[in-house]
Image (spheres, rainbow, N blue to C red):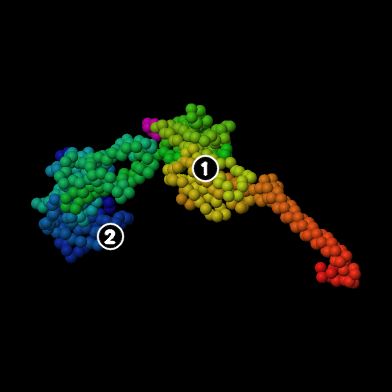
Amino acid sequence: MYRSHSTRNNGLDIVSPVYMSRKLQTDDLDETRDCDLDNVNVDVIELVFEASTAVLIRYSGAYTVNPSNKSLSLQSSDKVLTEVGKKATLPCGLETQWGIEWLQNGKSIIKYTNKMKLFGALVTDKHRYNVPSHTTNDLTIMDIKLEDSGNFTCQYGKSSRTVQLFVFQVLTFPSASLLVSEDLVLELKTSPSSIPGLQVSWEKDGITKLEDLKLEENNMQLNSGGTYICRIKMGGGNSLDITRQIQVFGFHDIPSTVYTTGNNPVTIPWVFNFNIRSKPLVSGVHVVEGSIRYSSQILNQLSDMEGAPGWPTNSNSKNGPEEVNNLSVQLLNPKSGKYQMEILLKMGDQKKNLTREVCVASLTVSDSQSGISPDTRVPLECRVNCLDINRNLCWHQQKTSHEICGQQGQRSLHIEVTAGNETEVTWTCSVTNGKERIVSADVTLEVKSFMDLSNSLFWVMIGVGIFIVILIVLIITLLIARSRRLRRARYRAWLLENLHQQRRCECKGFSPQRLRENF
């Protein structure tokens, strides 16, 4: 048999305990009662006897007996710190079925008397107060409010235990969800309003930002979102941490420069930290309007494409990558310079116009040169109209691995190189980020070959060679002619001498052949 009922008595709600009958005997009781527990499926059964001298409690099959005239020594001056909206448990520590009463600031809120559970007359939300276990008789309060703070007393006979409840609340302005560049204010409310020895600090990512009841963060960016912790400390080692998760919706500011060469199409990145193109928008952020401009000219405007924002294709631009968080736009015929992107976002009643500026940086180099003479000094120039402060320009010659770099953020680089004996040399100018080359342009130097028929030096050398050959031939010819003249002169001299001797020696029989042989 199972029965229960409730009545009203002097403005108090009286809830009668549940009676259950079954044959039960124990050596610690002076009497036995019949309690029928058939067909009752419970984990904890409380048996209460009228005018009994003992309280019999059965917890999961274990029986304990507590004499009702036993007096316990209760502690006092406990402190409990909690947050608005949470559940608070106030310790009592007394194991007894009846005779427990909880008071708030001296006024009764809940009382367990013989066979009855009574609520105080001022308690309007009875479901918030409960004593879940009579083993400890701790009081739980659900959905804590600021006005719940105060002194709570667990009273049993002449013994009592007082617990002081402190309630805290972190207020977020304008809300926990912000659009980028908005301001955030976090403020701690306390009850009671003045707490001696209270220490409050605000932390994010393990870094203490401020020690005060109010934290103000201006111009919130994407990296400003995250978990903010309010650390509360009081005397006696009591502490409480209250966390607030802050979301910041917007787009990423990097990269702010897009590099290209010539008139190649480029994609201007516009990536958001939420699914701006999802249908529907799960974040609650909606696109009202948007556009991309070059100088004062509007190149394209966002439109509603099947329930999600997108860029219509025209002669200037079209949609970039088809990703739910991506509103990048591809420029088909880009001009070097700065582009302005604007978007109006709405989240609830909040509206925010956001702008982004991206520079299309065109890398230009000196013209390639041909017909360069060896050992000639050749100037090379590399220039870009905008450059990130952490990037630099570098000239690189691949065959020799020779490299010349400018300062970071320097938008032009002028060098002079000496043409070697190679017929063709290529120098490359690059925008670099450390060892990474982002964009490059080449300059080719063609050096004149010595055997090149168009090389004037070649013809000069040919002319000089011919002149030298002619000169040598002339000298040899003159030497040969001179030698012949000498020989002829000697021959004539010999003939004359031979004739002279023949005349002188005709009478003596001198032979001219001998003179000739001697000659």
Q: Is residue 272 above or below residue 288?
A: below
Quarter where residue 486 is shown: bottom right
Residue nearest the viewer, comparing 303 with 38: 303
Q: Which residues are magenta?
A: 347-351
* Residue 382 circle label: 1
At label 1, the amino acid type is: Cys
Is residue 517 among what the camera can see?
Answer: yes
Residue 89 pos. (x, y %): 23, 50
Residue 122 pos. (x, y %): 18, 39
Residue 245 pos. (x, y %): 34, 44
Residue nearest the viewer, comparing 366 with 353: 366
Number of other residues with Cα within 10 Å of mark 2, as a class: few under 14, some 14 to 19, many 20 or more: few
Is residue 14 among what the camera can see?
Answer: no
Q: Is residue 320 above or below residue 3?
A: above
Residue 43 pos. (x, y %): 29, 56
CB under 8 Å between discs 1 and 2: no
What residue do we see at 39% from left, 42% from top? 222
At label 2, the amino acid type is: Ser
Q: Is 315 colored magenta in this rendering?
A: no
* Residue 60 circle label: 2
- Of all residues shown, which one is farthest toward the left? 158
Left or right: 437 with respect to 16? right
Q: Secondary structure at mark 1?
A: strand
* Residue 331 circle label: none
Between marks 1 and 2 in the image, the one whose residue lies nearer the viewer: 1
- Of all residues shown, which one is farthest toward the front? 507
Left or right: 131 with respect to 344? left
